[in-house]
């Protein structure tokens, strides 16, 4: 799997436009300013990725060359353009026609304030973003490009936060386009919303979704050694508290996790799903195993839901540098109190521990479905805070992303007869309105919950990928 420690490995080429009209002194100053700005971005924690400086481009050939360089750089996730001076936009057509990466146009200027006492035509020749960027904006609109525009002073905190948010969306697009999803068995029988067009998903989103039989995993499970299980048990001890006497059930989950991870790493899968209806010789439905794999950054979906497994992996990649929490989720039950309408989400065994408010516990309890041994799972209550709930559905002729702003609540009550990991949230604007809007839009009962992303990043991702987007909030 990829290194999830930081987003600094992802690069964005900073291409600053001008022209030869103004002379070498002006172009030299443009380059100086562009380098200072790139260094400033890279020193700010609000900018999660690396901005790479590119010398000023002055004509069509230089623009085309810079964009081809960005296209061909396997670490480049997008380009950022800015017109320091006026840069006639017909020069940009050839390059922008070739652009294959996400595209951010920043409308800024090096100086914040108008220098009233010293402003002259030399200053105006150098600092023409106010109309140079409008010329650039026109050609992007005329060419119907997928362009994000962010306006503001380049040192302003809000401006940099917005740029950083767009970068996260572009990183999601980058990882989406190289994601491989492992289907262990098929979808849950008779369920509609987990179905989807896998060919269109690969064309539109880049997801290569491949099926393997449960037997392919069973063989690897049988080959796991006791030493490997011991090593995995030691990992569990680092992150979780053992709250069961049924250690053998926990060791079997460790065995399943080792096998699934081996298979995914060998075949370069970043996400996977299971299906409790088809376990073959597996003695337990992967619970703790799936949860701990999510902790490590693998995407997961239950009941054959390959779309939400892939979406979880993408959203994890967008926040890989943040200690925020991102989890597979299923709507479980409502609290219809008009003064405090809430939704409780969970799943039988498979909620990521990254959203836990306290150290999770490993417990073993019977599972009423699957007809297998009692599975080990992590149980916990989720942390409070603002979050987004996101799902992706196949509408037959297009993919639709649906996002609901939510506020996760501190769960005051215990659930002694429902031993699961659970998240309690207030949907915005309220429970009834959000539920109705979600259902009108066709939202699934499976989704991804993220404390680190907002409507803005998810909307930017959908725009980059060219899919429909609906916001409920």
Image (cartoon, helix red, strand yellow):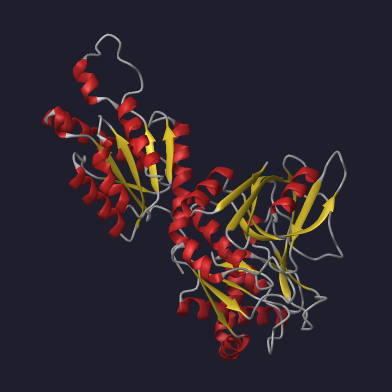
Give the image location of residue 411, x and y in percent. 78, 50
Give the image location of residue 154, x and y in percent. 37, 32
Residue 81 is at least partly visible in this image: yes
In the rendered image, which quarter contains the C terminus?
top right
Q: Camera-side residue: 42 or 31?
A: 31
418 vs 356, left or right, is right
302 vs 415, left or right, is left
Residue 225 is at least partly visible in this image: no
Where residue 141 sits, quadrant-wise, is: top left
Q: Camera-side residue: 229 or 127?
A: 127
Please name the residue shown 27% across and 42% down the image. Answer: 92
Q: Is residue 370 above or below residue 321?
A: below
Q: Residue furthest left?
A: 24
Give the image location of residue 260, x and y in percent. 57, 79
Give the image location of residue 434, x and y in percent. 74, 46
Where residue 213 sits, quadrant-wise, is: bottom right
276 vs 162, left or right, is right
Q: Is residue 371 above or below residue 139?
A: below
**Total number of numbered discs in the rendering:** 0
319 vs 422, left or right, is left
């Amino acid at each position: 799997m990829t290194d999830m420690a930081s987003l600094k490995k992802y690069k964005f080429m900073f291409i600053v436009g001008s022209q030869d009209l103004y002379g070498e002194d002006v172009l030299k100053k443009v380059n100086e300013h562009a380098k200072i700005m790139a260094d400033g971005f890279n020193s700010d924690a609000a900018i999660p990725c690396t901005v790479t400086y590119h010398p000023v481009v002055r004509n069509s050939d230089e623009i085309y060359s810079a964009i081809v360089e960005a296209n061909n750089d396997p670490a480049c996730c997008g380009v950022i353009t800015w017109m320091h001076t006026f840069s006639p936009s017909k020069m940009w057509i050839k390059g922008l026609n070739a652009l294959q990466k996400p595209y951010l146009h920043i409308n800024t200027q090096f100086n914040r304030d108008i220098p009233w006492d010293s402003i002259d035509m030399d200053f105006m020749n150098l600092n023409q973003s106010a109309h140079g960027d409008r010329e650039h904006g026109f050609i992007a609109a005329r060419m119907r490009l997928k362009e994000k525009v962010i306006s503001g002073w380049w040192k302003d905190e809000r401006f940099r936060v917005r740029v950083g948010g767009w970068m996260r969306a572009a990183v999601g697009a980058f990882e989406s386009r190289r994601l491989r999803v492992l289907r262990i068995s098929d979808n849950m029988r008779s369920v509609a919303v987990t179905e989807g067009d896998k060919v269109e998903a690969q064309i539109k989103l880049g997801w290569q979704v491949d099926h393997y039989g449960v037997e392919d995993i069973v063989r690897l499970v049988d080959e796991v050694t006791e030493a490997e299980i011991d090593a995995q048990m030691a990992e569990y001890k680092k992150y979780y508290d053992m709250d069961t006497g049924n250690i053998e059930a926990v060791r079997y989950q460790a065995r399943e996790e080792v096998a699934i991870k081996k298979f995914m790493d060998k075949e370069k899968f970043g996400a996977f799903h299971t299906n409790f209806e088809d376990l073959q010789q597996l003695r337990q439905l992967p619970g703790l195993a799936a949860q701990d794999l999510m902790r490590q950054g693998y995407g997961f979906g239950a009941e054959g839901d390959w779309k939400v497994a892939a979406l979880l992996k993408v959203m994890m990649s967008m926040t890989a540098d943040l200690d925020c929490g991102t989890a597979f989720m299923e709507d479980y039950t409502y609290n219809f109190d008009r003064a405090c309408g809430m939704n409780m989400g969970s799943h039988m065994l498979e909620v990521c521990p990254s959203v836990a408010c306290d150290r999770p516990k490993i417990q073993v309890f019977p599972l009423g479905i699957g007809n297998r041994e009692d599975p080990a799972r992590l149980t916990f209550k989720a942390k409070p805070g603002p979050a987004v709930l996101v799902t992706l559905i196949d509408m037959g002729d297009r993919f639709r992303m649906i996002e609901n702003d939510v506020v996760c609540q501190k769960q005051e009550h215990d659930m002694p007869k429902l031993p699961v990991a659970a998240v309690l949230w207030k949907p915005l604007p309220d429970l009834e309105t959000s539920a109705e809007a979600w259902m009108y839009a066709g939202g699934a009962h499976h989704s991804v919950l993220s404390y680190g992303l907002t409507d803005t990043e998810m909307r930017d991702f959908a725009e980059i990928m060219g899919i429909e987007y609906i916001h409920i909030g």
